[in-house]
Image (cartoon, coloured by chain):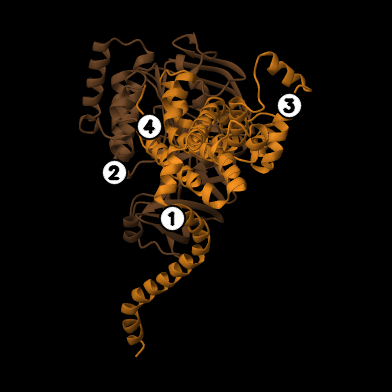
């Protein structure tokens, strides 16, 4: 269990303010946020590589905030793997053994277990400079896990990998987390990676935590406009909430349930949640005739710009949908926005949609 | 007609490109030649001039042998002192920002800019009886004027920028993340320095030592002021040239060049050894 209490870190040109986190052994915790938001700095502060100005870091109830990095018992795996280029794979994995008082037989069995588990046998005596991305990452993981860390900190572990290795390492990380039952804290820019691996997470912005909670709530129930934009809710428009409806100019959208708050708010809808209505299906709430204003093909996914009652909306549709429904700029199409995909951001201080 | 143009031009394009490349590289080659010849011709003349008899005579001349040995060991000693004290300084400059850092870097570079006789005079004035430091050193029995201590002091002075700057570049080329990874694996700062940073900087350090030794072996201007005697090879060459002429100085030059060459080749080979994790 890692608990971060009111952590403040000052480095030249940047500050982390009053960070509070709880990460249990069952948690695969994701830190997400724009570049320069302080995610990696927070990870390094936990690992003791950056001095902290104030606050506490507790691991299993023990305050490690004042300890040097080598005495914190936390594993850290970097994006570039940070393997020692002058040492072989074997020497890299065994690098930390001498500092942890492991007897020969324990070290030997742990080493063999990891080599087998991470399939490193054939490359043990190779130089780390001649490894594939996946092999490098597995070596870096083995090097950290060899010391049985109390938590594993992963700084963008997959971003430097080719897609083919990325899926393998993703699966490996998930199964390792299940096997080891220690907190994993992941810094990532890749939302699909975060959603695949993590169960909880936090969004950082300019050194503060904007939102902290279940990963699903980060992506579906952002607490403010920054979080909504950051997690990809491209449809973010000012609205007026009343009687279970949100009005945007002449457009009237059914919201999931009535809110105690009534008045000005923001409406947030993911572009993936706006789809063409069923052809010939019964008319239901939140079906609108939209004018297609632009179509931007991005491989298998098309970014479709729509206009409904003077309100611009963005939708992501598959190429198949675009072809099947003959979606063309200038054409009209019936669209559907499921009411449970509509998220209302109440003004700060007012009752939130989740409450 | 319009399609015929590209079909005709395309096959000849690679040949034309390679012809232009050849022309360009030929120009580079001829432009480089004067500088290379400036170094090679006088040295070749120097190496080819002395006959076998003169070379043999020089190698059995006790004064020449002593001067050559003196030059080699004082230069290596100066280089070792630079390693001992220059390595911490280089690491500090590479890894830490502190007030006055730019000034310290400027101070490290100073020996390159100062005329070498000035270095000799500066060291002598500090080590003389009129300076408290000189009196302190003499009370300890340390003499600078006309001693090996003086020679090595001068050689350290002139070698510092070569070792420190090269080694600093080496430390800078080691990613800080490697040191951080080492710390999270349980290694303290000292252990990280010895097991990670130093082995990766080793080739730069050897290069720094080579440059420092090379600078030291060729030093004349400062040595001739601080310690004309005991005579190092450059001072002996100068003395033989002024006293007896070109013919008597050339064999000593020959052996100094050969010994320096062998020394540097040897040091280069050392830098290729893979560091072993202690």
Q: Secondary structure at mark 2?
A: helix
Q: Nearer the viewer, mark 4 or mark 2?
A: 4
What is the distance, in whole Å, between disc 4 and disc 3 at their CAs? 49 Å
Residue A260 visible somewhere in the drawing: no
- The image position of residue A79, as x and y in percent, is 42, 35
The residue that label 4 is drawn on is A83
The residue that label 2 is drawn on is A164
Q: Nearer the viewer, residue B155 or B247?
A: B247
Q: Nearer the viewer, residue A208 or A274?
A: A208
Which quadrant of the structure image shows residue A24? top left
The residue that label 3 is drawn on is B126
The residue that label 1 is drawn on is B48
Q: Secondary structure at mark 3?
A: helix
Residue at the (44%, 59%) spot, across then down? A296
**Dot 4 and dot 1 residues touching (CB under 8 Å):** no
Q: Chain of mark 1?
A: B
Q: Is residue A160 above or below residue A78?
A: below
């Amino acid at each position: 269990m890692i608990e971060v209490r009111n952590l403040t870190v000052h480095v030249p040109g940047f500050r982390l303010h009053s960070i509070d986190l709880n990460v249990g052994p069952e948690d695969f915790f994701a830190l997400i946020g724009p570049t320069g938001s302080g995610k990696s700095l927070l990870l390094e502060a936990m690992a003791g590589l950056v001095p902290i100005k104030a606050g506490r870091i507790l691991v299993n109830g023990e305050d490690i905030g004042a300890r040097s990095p080598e005495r914190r018992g936390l594993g850290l795996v970097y994006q570039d793997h940070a393997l020692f280029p002058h040492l072989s794979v074997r020497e890299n994995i065994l690098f930390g053994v001498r500092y942890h008082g492991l007897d020969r037989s324990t070290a030997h069995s742990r080493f063999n277990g990891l080599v087998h588990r991470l399939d490193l046998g054939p490359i043990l005596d190779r130089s780390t400079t001649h490894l594939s991305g996946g092999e490098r990452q597995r070596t870096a993981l083995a090097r950290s896990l060899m010391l049985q860390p109390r938590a594993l900190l992963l700084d963008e572990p997959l971003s430097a990998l080719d897609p083919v290795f990325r899926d393998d390492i993703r699966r490996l990380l998930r199964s390792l987390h299940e096997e080891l039952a220690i907190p994993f804290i992941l810094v990532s820019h890749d939302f699909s990676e975060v959603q695949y691996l993590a169960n909880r997470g936090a969004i950082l912005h300019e050194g503060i935590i904007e939102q902290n909670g279940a990963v699903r709530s980060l992506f579906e129930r952002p607490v403010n406009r920054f979080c909504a934009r950051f997690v990809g809710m491209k449809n973010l428009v000012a609205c007026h909430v009343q009687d279970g409806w949100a009005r945007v100019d002449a457009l009237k959208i059914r919201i999931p349930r009535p809110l105690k708050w009534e008045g000005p708010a923001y409406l947030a809808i993911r572009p993936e949640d706006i789809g063409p209505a069923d052809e010939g299906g019964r008319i239901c709430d939140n079906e609108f005739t939209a004018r297609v204003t632009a179509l931007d093909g991005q491989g298998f996914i098309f970014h479709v710009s729509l206009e409904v009652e003077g309100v611009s909306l963005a939708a992501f549709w598959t190429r198949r949908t675009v072809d099947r429904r003959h979606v063309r700029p200038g054409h009209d199409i019936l669209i559907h926005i499921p009411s449970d995909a509509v998220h209302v951001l109440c003004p700060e201080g007012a009752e939130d949609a989740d409450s | 007609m319009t399609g015929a143009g590209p079909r005709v031009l395309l096959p000849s394009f690679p040949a034309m490109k390679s012809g232009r490349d050849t022309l360009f590289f030929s120009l580079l080659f001829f432009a480089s030649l004067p500088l290379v010849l400036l170094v090679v011709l006088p040295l070749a003349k120097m190496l080819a001039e002395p006959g076998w008899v003169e070379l043999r005579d020089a190698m059995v001349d006790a004064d020449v042998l002593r001067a050559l040995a003196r030059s080699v060991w004082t230069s290596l000693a100066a280089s070792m002192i630079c390693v001992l004290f220059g390595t911490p300084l280089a690491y500090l400059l590479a890894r830490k920002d502190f007030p006055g850092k730019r000034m310290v870097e400027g101070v490290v570079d100073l020996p390159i800019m100062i005329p070498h006789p000035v270095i000799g005079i500066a060291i002598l004035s500090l080590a003389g009886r009129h300076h408290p430091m000189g009196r302190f050193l003499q009370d300890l029995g340390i003499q600078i004027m006309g001693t090996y201590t003086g020679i090595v002091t001068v050689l350290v002075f002139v070698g510092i920028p070569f070792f420190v700057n090269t080694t600093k570049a080496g430390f800078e080329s080691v990613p800080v993340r490697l040191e951080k990874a080492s710390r999270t694996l349980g290694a303290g700062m000292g252990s990280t320095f010895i097991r990670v940073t130093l082995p990766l900087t080793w080739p730069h350090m050897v290069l720094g030592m080579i440059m420092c030794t090379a600078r030291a072996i060729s030093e004349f201007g400062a040595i001739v002021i601080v310690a004309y005697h005991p005579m190092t090879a450059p001072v002996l060459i100068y003395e033989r040239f002024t006293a007896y002429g070109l013919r008597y100085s050339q064999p000593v030059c020959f052996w100094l060049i050969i010994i320096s060459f062998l020394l540097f080749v040897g040091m280069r080979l050392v830098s290729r050894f893979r560091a072993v994790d202690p």
